[in-house]
Amino acid sequence: MTRNLPSGDITADRRAEYARMLSLSGDHAAAADLMAQAMELVPDWAAGWLQLGELAEKAGETDRATAALKHVLSLDGDDVFGAGLRIALIEGVVPPLPPSAYVAGLFNDYAGRFDESLVRKLGYSIPGRLSALVRAHVGHGHRFADAVDLGCGTGLFGAEIAGSCFRLEGYDIADAMLAKAAAKTIYNHLGRADISLPPEQSGLFGQTRRADLVSAADVMIYLGDLDAAFTNVATLIRPSGLFAFSVEKSGAETGFELRSSLRYAHSEAHVVSALHAHGLETAAIEETVIRADAGEPVAGLLFLARKA
């Protein structure tokens, strides 16, 4: 991954590897100290400062961790490493959105092993469950005139729903994901888009109000504030069109939270309120397990909404 980019200095890279090994053995403080020695050799190595910040946080040295992560931000103005999110977690604040560069970098790095890691290793089943929720609502013989798959990734949900669509479009923030989706030859059109931006900047629109199905499987977990995303959906969707999507379920009664995984979780009440604010009526809600994380099930919610 991008975070593991070498520094170009053999000694620094070797110390960084030893630091990772020490951390795996449970000695996080010694690992952080060794990583700090590596950074003396390569003070402009952003990925190294990120590793130092993570190791210091594991060691309980929050001041040292925050300082290291702020140094990452000074070297990486776009925050491709998500250092700002980690600082927010340490300081107990919840940023409304992650940096777009971080999300794009994450999935460009992940694309080559996405299907294998997510489906086979983590038990990811949202595409099948979400398509089943849609078909239960409209009937198995129904075909959508124009479906738009937001955050289409490698095309996992697209493969589930393509046979029920006359036209299927896919959009993603990561070019490498779009390349994997194209190889499946299930989409009539693929394009790069960022649904965290307002409609005029998102990259989605030529003709508005064109979709009778919009989907977003495991997309909202990378957004805290859903306003821009739901505005994009409301602009895309035809009257009476459907919006199918998933979220990680927050334990809080309202609002959303940023988790240590750097993914967001939303409460059911918060999502329903946000839907209604954008002219979308809730048609169905289903609780499910999204995936495993560190061997533990991650609770999620599937939503089906209809444009009023």
Image: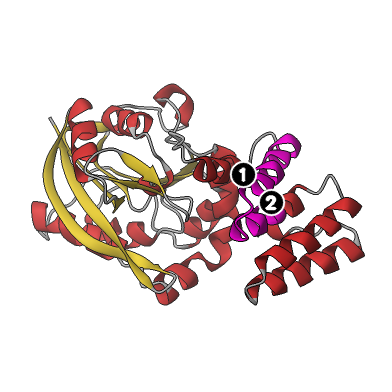
For the residues labelled 2 and 1, the Cα–Cα distance comes to 7 Å
Does residue 148 appear to the left or right of 198 in the view shown?
left
Residue 57 on the magenta segment: yes
In front of the other: 99 or 56: 56
Tags 2 and 1 in contact by the CB under 8 Å rule?
yes
Viewport quadrant of the N terminus: bottom right
Examine the rendered structure and indicate whether residue 222 appears above or below residue 164.
above
Does residue 79 appear to the left or right of 167 in the view shown?
right
Q: Which residue is mark 2?
A: 50
Does residue 206 appear to the left or right of 130 in the view shown?
right
First to last magenta residue range: 50-76
x and y, in percent, of residue 197 in the image: 45, 29
Picture quarter containing residue 9?
bottom right
Q: Residue furthest top?
A: 200
Count of numbered tags? 2
x and y, in percent, of residue 273 in the image: 19, 33
At label 1, the amino acid type is Ala
Examine the rendered structure and indicate whether residue 225 appears above or below residue 167.
above
Q: Name the residue: 34% across, 62% down.
A: 159
- The secondary structure type at the circle numbered 2 is helix
Main secondary-structure element of the magenta-colored stretch: helix
Q: Name the residue: 30% across, 57% down.
A: 162
- The secondary structure type at the circle numbered 1 is helix
Viewport quadrant of the C terminus: top left
x and y, in percent, of residue 233 in the image: 30, 34
x and y, in percent, of residue 264 in the image: 39, 47
Q: Which residue is mark 1?
A: 83
Residue 37 is marked as none
Q: Name the residue: 84% across, 69% down.
A: 14
Residue 69 on the magenta segment: yes
Which circle's residue, 2 or 1, is located before the other in the chain? 2
At label 2, the amino acid type is Leu
